[in-house]
Amino acid sequence: MASPLSPKRGLVLVADDDPVMRLLMREMLEQVGLDTLEAEDGAQALACYRGMAPDLVLLDVDMPAMDGYAVCRAIRASETQAAVPIIMVTGSDDLEAVTLAYEEGATDFVSKPINWPILGHRVLYVLRASDAIARLRIADAQNRAVLAAIPDTFFRLDKDGYYLDYEQGHDAHAGFASEHCAGRHLRDVLPHDIAQRLLEQARAVLEQQQVRSVDYELVRHDAIHHFEARLVATGPDEVLGLVRDISERKRTEEQIRRLAYCDSLTGIPNRQAFLETLERELTRSRHGGKKFAVLFMDLDSFKRINDTLGHNVGDHLLKAVSERLRETIRPSDLVSRAEQHGNNLARLGGDEFTILIPDLERVENALNVAHRVKEAMRRPFLIEGHEIFVTASIGISLYPEDGEDCNSLLKYADTAMYHAKNCGKNNAKLYSSSLTMQIMSHVKLEVGLRRALQNHELYLLYQPQIDVPSGQIVGVEALVRWRHPERGIISPTEFIPLAEETGLIVPIGEWVLRTACAQARSWADMGPQPVRMAVNLSAKQFKDDNLTQVVLTALQETGLAPGLLELELTEGTLMDDARATMITLDQLRGIGVYLSIDDFGTGYSSMNYLKRFDVRALKIDKSFISGLPQDSENAAITRAIIAMAHGLKMAVVAEGVETDEQLVMLEHYGCDLAQGYYLGHPSPPESITLMLRNQYALASPATL
Ligand SMILES: Nc1nc2c(ncn2[C@@H]2O[C@@H]3COP(=O)(O)O[C@H]4[C@@H](O)[C@H](n5cnc6c(=O)[nH]c(N)nc65)O[C@@H]4COP(=O)(O)O[C@H]3[C@H]2O)c(=O)[nH]1
C-alpha cells in the first residue's frame, strides 16, 4: 500500500550481490508503490544507473569486484545536474563504513540488519527530501539569476539592523563594497538619519509583512545620488533590501515637475504651483497658529503696452517684471524657509503675479512688501530700446482674517486688487469683508444706473452764480441728481465716478447737456439778460470723439445761443493728453461755447497750461473758500489766483461761498462771480425761475 506521505512514486535501483536481499528489498519498495530495478554487482549497478536513470539507488557496500563506495563515487563523478539520492546499505554499527559512505557522496544509509517494514518509508522520505532539495536548488538558481540580471544592490538585514550580507549591484558607484557592510550595523555604514529610517521601515516590514520603500540621498563621488531601498521580509527576523540608484528618475521627475509647475515665459512658478504652495502654507499656519498674506499684483497698463509696442516687448516686460519681483521679495522678512523661497512668487497668467508672505507678524509687513513692489515697478524698464513706465495695483488678503481656504484667499486678494485699481491704480489695498459688501453694492448700483436714464430717475438742480459787484444772477450750474427707487436721492459724487468707470457717463452727460440747454433756452426766453448755463464735463466725456457733435446737436435742438453754454472742465481732464485736448478745445471754441476750469487749485494749477488752453474762466475750489476769512494762507492763495486769472484776462468764480464775510472778502479781492449756499442752494428749475422773475422784476418792473 502506498504511503500517504509519498508525494510521487519513482524508480529505485536495488544493487546487492545477495539475491535474497534483493528480493526482500524489491518486495518492500513495491509495497509502498515504487518501481524497482536490480543489479547483482557494482558494474551492473553502474550500467543500470546509466541506462535507466533511476530516481534513487539503494546500494550495498559489500559487493564483489566493484563495491558500493566505488559505484557511489562513479555515479557522483558522472553527474552533471541534480544529484540522485543514494542510500548505502552498511553492516551494523559500522561507523567507519558510514563515514566513508558520506565521503563518497551518499545521501543516507541503512544498516543491517534491515528493519524491513520501514525500509520503503525511509526510501520514500529520502526521495521526498531530495525532491525538495532539487526544488530549492532550482529556486536558488532562479533567485541568483534574477539578482544577477537586475542592477540593484541587495542585502539582508537582521531585525536589529545588522547586515547579514551585502551584494553590490551593477553600478559600482551606487553602493558600498560588500566587505564594508557585511556584519556591520546600518548606522556604521549610512548617515544616522537614513540608517534610522531604514531600521524603522525594516521593523514595520517584519511586523506587517508588507513591502516598504525608503528614499534617501547620499553624496557619492562628489555628486548627490538618490536611492530607493525596497524592503521585504524573507523570514520572521530577516529583511531583504533591494537598493536602486534612482537619480536619473528623479532628474526626469524634476524636469516634468518644472514643466508642469513653471511658467514657461518667466520661469517662475505658475498658478498650479502657487496653489499647492498656498495649500501647504495653509496647513502649516493652521497647525502652527501662524498668519500669512497673499499679495495679488496686476500691472496697470500692460494691455496698452502690448497693443502699442507689440507682444514681443510685452513678453520681455513680463520677464523683467518677474525678475524685479524676485529681487524685491528676497529680503528676509519674506522668507521663512529656504526651500520655500522659489515658490513664494508666481505668475498666474497675463500680467497677474502673486506673492506669498509666510509667518506674518504684523499686517504692516505685508503692506511694506506691497510698497516695495510698487516702488520696484516704478523704475523704468528698458526693453528693446523702449523706456517703459509701468505701475502696479496690489491687493492683499490675510490668513486667517479674510479666509480659511486657498481659493477664497486668492479670490479676495484679487478683489482687493480690483479695489486698488478703482482707487486710482498704483495702489495697494487690503481685502476686508466690508470690501465685498462694497463691491456688491457697487455692482447693484451699476445695474441701477443703467436703468436710471430710461426710468427717468435722473434730474437736474441748478445753482445760481452771482455777479459779485452787482449781486445779479448771471449764470447757473446744472448739477445732476439720481432719485433711486430704494435708496432715495444719490449724490453725483457717488454715482458720477461709477458712470465714468462704466462708460455710462457718455449717455448720461448727453442727457444732462440736452436738458440743461433746453432749460437755459426757456430762461433765455424769459427776460432781457439771459443767464449762462454751466454744465460739468467729466474726463471721459471730454475724450469722447462725439463730444463736439453732441454739444452742437444740443444747441441746435434747443436753439440756445452757444455763448450761453459754459462747459466746466477740471484741470485733470485738460492735462491728460495735451495734444488731443487742444484739438477738442479748438473745436468747442469754434462752436462758440464758454469754457471754464472747475475746482481750480486742487490739481496742477499751472499757469502755462492755462495760457495754452485759453479758457475763459476758472472756478476757485470751495476748499480754499471754506477757510475764509480766518485762514490767512487760503486767503493769500485765493487772492493770488484771482490776480493771476485777471492777468490772463480770465473771469474768476468762487465756489462754496457760505457766509457774508466770505462774499465781502471775495469782493474785496476783485472776484467776478460767486456761487454757494449763501447765495443759493442747488435748486429745482421752478425756484430758479422764481428767482430770475424777481430779479427781472426789480430791474425793470415793466417786463413782468
Ligand atoms: N460745501 C458746500 N458745497 C457747495 C456749496 N455750494 C455748492 N456746493 C456743492 O459743490 C459742488 C459743486 O459742483 P462741482 O465742483 O462741479 O462738483 C460736482 C461735479 O464734479 C459732479 N457733478 C455734478 N453734476 C454733474 C454732471 O451733470 N456731470 C458731471 N460730469 N459731473 C457732475 O459732482 C460734483 C458734486 O456735485 P454736488 O454734490 O451737486 O455738489 C456741488 C454743490 O452742491 C457750498 O456753499 N458749500
Image: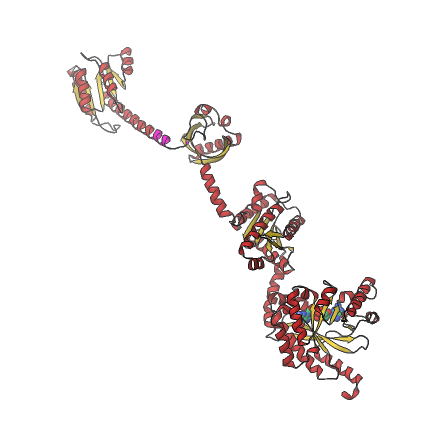
Ligand 1 resides in the quarter of the picture at bottom right
Magenta stretch: includes residue 341: no
Question: Do we see residue 488 in this rendering?
Answer: no
State the residue in front, 660 or 172: 172
What colour scheme does the image use? secondary structure
Identify the residue shown where x is 66% and y is 68%. Answer: 582
- Residue 84 percent across, percent down from the top left: 25, 23
Instruction: Please identify the quadrant where the C terminus is shown.
Output: bottom right
Q: As drawn, is 243 to the left or to the right of 596?
A: left
Instruction: Please identify the quadrant where the N terminus is shown.
Output: top left
Magenta stretch: includes residue 146: yes
How many discs mark residues in the rendered view? Answer: 0
Residue at the extreme left of the image, as rendered? 19
State the residue in front, 82 or 341: 341
Residue 50 to residue 602: above or below: above
Residue 639 to residue 473: above or below: above
- Residue 243 percent across, percent down from the top left: 43, 32
Residue at the extreme bottom of the image, as rendered? 702
State the residue in front, 106 or 511: 511
Range of residues picked out in magenta: 143-152
- Residue 114 percent across, percent down from the top left: 23, 16
Quadrant of the image occupied by residue 573: bottom right
Identify the residue shown where x is 77% and y is 83%. Answer: 696
Quadrant of the image occupied by residue 168: top left
Question: Do we see residue 205 in this rendering?
Answer: yes
